[in-house]
Each structure stands twice: as C-alpha cells, then as structure tokens.
Amino acid sequence: MNARLIISIAKSLLLARWRQTLIAAIGVTFSITMFITLLSFMAGLNDLLDGLILNRTPHIRLFNEVKPNSRQPVNESPEYKNTYNFISSIKSGASRQEIYNSGPIMQALKQDSRVLGYSPKLTAQVFFNDGAVDITGVVNGIEVIAESKLFHFSDYVTEGVAIDISKIPNSIILGKGLAEKLLADMGDIVQVTTVKGERFSLKVVGYFQSGIQDFDKVQSYASINTVQKIMGKPGNYITDIQVRLKDMEIAPALAKEYTALFGADAEDIQTANSQFETGSSIRTLISYAVGITLLIVAGFGIYNILNMMIYEKMDSIAILKATGFSGKDVKRIFLFIALSIGLFGGAVGLLLGFGLSAIIDQVPFNTASLPTIKTYPVNYNPVFYAIGIIFSLITTWFAGWFPARKASKIDPVVIIRGK
C-alpha cells in the first residue's frame, strides 16, 4: 500500500485521540529527560570522585621497594649449611630507595611512543616544628612544570603560584590542613627537621588542597633540588618516576615490561586504585538500570494506549481491511503511531534533559574540601543522548508491535457481522 496513505491514516488516528497520544508522549519525554539528567549528573560525579585520586596518580610508578632479605646470616655459615634452621627473623636488606640509572630510564621513557610524559619525584619524611611540638609530615620534591602538565598540580594550589617553588630558593607549598596546624601564613618561615636530626628553614609560597583532608594534613611540596638538599643527597637522587600513558588500559602489561627492562619496581594505576574503578562502574550501572527502567515503564504506557485504541477503532480497522488494506498495512499503521510517539517524546526529552543538566551545572556547590569545584559536576557526553533516543525508539517499537500484530489479525467479516 502507498506509504503516504499509511502515514496519513496513522496521523488521523493519532489526532483522533490526541489526549491519550499526548499522555504517552509525555511518559516517554519524562523518561528520556530523567535518563539523560541522571546519567549526565552521575557521570560528572564519577569524573569528580575519580579525578580526586586518578588525576594525581601516575599510570605507572617506577620505584625501588624496600624488601626483606631472603637469606639469613646463619645460612651463610659453612657449619650450618646442610642443616635446617628455624630462625626466621628476616630483616630488610641493604637495598636503596634511589632509582639506579634514573637519567637513562627517563631518556628511554621520553623515546617510548606509548608514554605521554613522565615526572620525577623525591619524597622526604620530616617533622614540622611547631614550638615544642613536632608534627609528622612529608615533603614531596617535584618538577612543577611536568607535575602540572601531567597531574594537574597547579589546579590544586588554592593560594600562591605553583611555579614559585622552582623560582624561590628554599620554598614550600603546604597542604591546607598542615598549614592550619602550623598557623602558617603566606610568606612565613617554617622549620623542618629530618629523620637524621638536621633542621632547615623553608618559606611558605602557597597552599595545596586536594580535597582529601587526611592527605592535606601531612603533604607538602617543594622543588626536587630543595628536597635533595634537605635529605643531603646528590643532584641525581630520585626515588620515584611517575609515568603518564596515552592509553591507561595498557598500564598493567607495560608495568611488567618496565620492571624487567629497568630493574625497578613498577606499580600500575589499576592495581593502586582498583576500588575507585569498581565504585565508578557500580554507580554507572545503577544509573543505566534506573534510566532503562523508566523507559520500559513508559513503553507499557504506550502499549496500553495502543491496545485501547485498537479496541475503540475495531470498526475503522475492519473497514480498512475490507477496502483492500492487508494485515501488514494495518501493522505498519500502528507501528508508525508507536514510533511517532517515541520519536517526538524522545526528541523533546533530549532537549529537556540537556536543559535540566545545564541548570544543575549552574547550581553553586561550595565546599571547603573541594576548592576547585564551584558548581555541581555534569558530563555532557553525546553518547548518553544517542543511547537515550535509541532506547526510546526500541522501547516504543516493542510497545507498538504487539498491539499492531493484534490489529493485523482482526477479521473484518466478524467485526462487521457483529455490528
């Protein structure tokens, strides 16, 4: 049958019961709106929570772990060589924390096409002297430019300028919680004592706030040269090399490769932060489950409305079939009605979902623990909108298929004879 005629008849049936059609479309619109809004907000929240850790975590960390000595002194004695020894007080060996040949390693990383960049790091355990009280803390020696480029370090410096620690000798950026403990203002001098008892004076040039309070109460940052001076180490002393990859998914395999190649320990981001990936996956799964449930509920509404339309339009269907319309033509008419409701309701739902997400994105969200966040996080991923309209059409197609199939099997003789 002529497609234009089928569309015209479907349009007439839609307009004849426009109130029910509108209710069905509103159901689809509401479902799509909430689906888009929920996914956008939840994805934005996932990005925020993961960013607190993952943005500050290297994809691969190269270091030398202090390991216990696998051989007991008693086993070295010829007298007890062939005996079974019950002594098991294995102590850490004389392995050093410094990465051996750090220069050639960084040069090799620079030439590796899989590596986006790297940043050397040095960590010193110190005591911050606050009068008669010593506060345990950590001073991280970093290269500010590389750290800011790869790990967004400058984004978390809430006061001062990150680059100052490389420009101003003997300067330090304190974690916000640590600065509050020390009552240290910008420009103040803080005293630190190393584990060897040596004392140094450092000038406060900024505050750092990661959003994790326990972290900010002990962490501070200085240039690598400053930390090497504090520890009394030479200019090539490096304890960590932080590697950022172009593809994070290859981190576990590449970590094993680097361990064998460089002779250093390597920890990948999946191993170090597996709990965050699990949490994000579960939150996303819940969001999709709720959104799809809303669409299915809307589909049942369309199914019920089309069923009622078929019962009320038995005469019209019988006349159509009596005048030459086949069962397939009738099925096409009702499927067109269902898809029209789904397409219209879905399109409006996408617009309303985007609008509601934009409103949420402008709502102020101010908290002391997250200084870089000013509004609620929203992710405008186009994939969400594509999934929304596809599921809208699929749901409404199934909702219309069963009533359409029923309408196509109506016997016009039985209907007309009954009348």
Image (cartoon, rainbow, N blue to C red):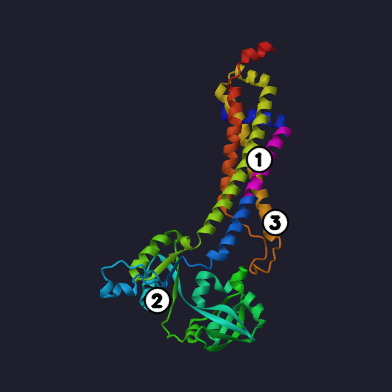
Q: Left or right: where does residue 35 sit relative to residue 263?
A: right
Q: Is residue 6 visible?
A: no
- Percent x, y of residue 280: 56, 55
Q: Residue 153, located in which quarter of the rendered image?
A: bottom right
Q: Secondary structure at mark 2?
A: loop
Identify the residue position indicated by label 2 in the image. 99
Magenta range: 19-36
For the residue pair 332 and 284, the one nearer the viewer reads as 284
In the picture shown, does residue 292 fall above or below 311? below
* Residue type indicated by callout 1: Val
Distance from disc 3 to disc 1, alpha carbons, whole Å, reads 21 Å
Q: In the rendered structure, does residue 30 fall within the stretch colored magenta? A: yes
Distance from disc 2 to disc 1, alpha carbons, whole Å, reads 60 Å
Identify the residue position indicated by label 1 in the image. 28
Do the residues bearing badges 3 and 1 touch, measured as CB atoms within 8 Å? no
Name the residue rendered at 61%, 19% in the picture.
410
Which residue is the extreme one toward the top? 417
* Residue type indicated by callout 2: Ile
Q: Is residue 360 visible?
A: yes
Sequence order check: which comes first, mark 3 or mark 1? 1
Q: In the rendered structure, does residue 119 fall within the stretch colored magenta? A: no
In the picture shown, does residue 267 fall above or below 224? above
Which residue is the extreme one toward the right? 19
* Residue type indicated by callout 3: Ile
- Where the C terminus falls, by quadrant? top right
Looking at the image, is mark 3 or mark 2 nearer the viewer? 2
Magenta region, main secondary structure:
helix
Distance from disc 3 to disc 2, alpha carbons, whole Å, reads 50 Å
Identify the residue position indicated by label 3 in the image. 359
Sequence order check: which comes first, mark 3 or mark 2? 2
Q: Secondary structure at mark 1?
A: helix
Q: Residue 333, located in which quarter of the rendered image?
A: top right
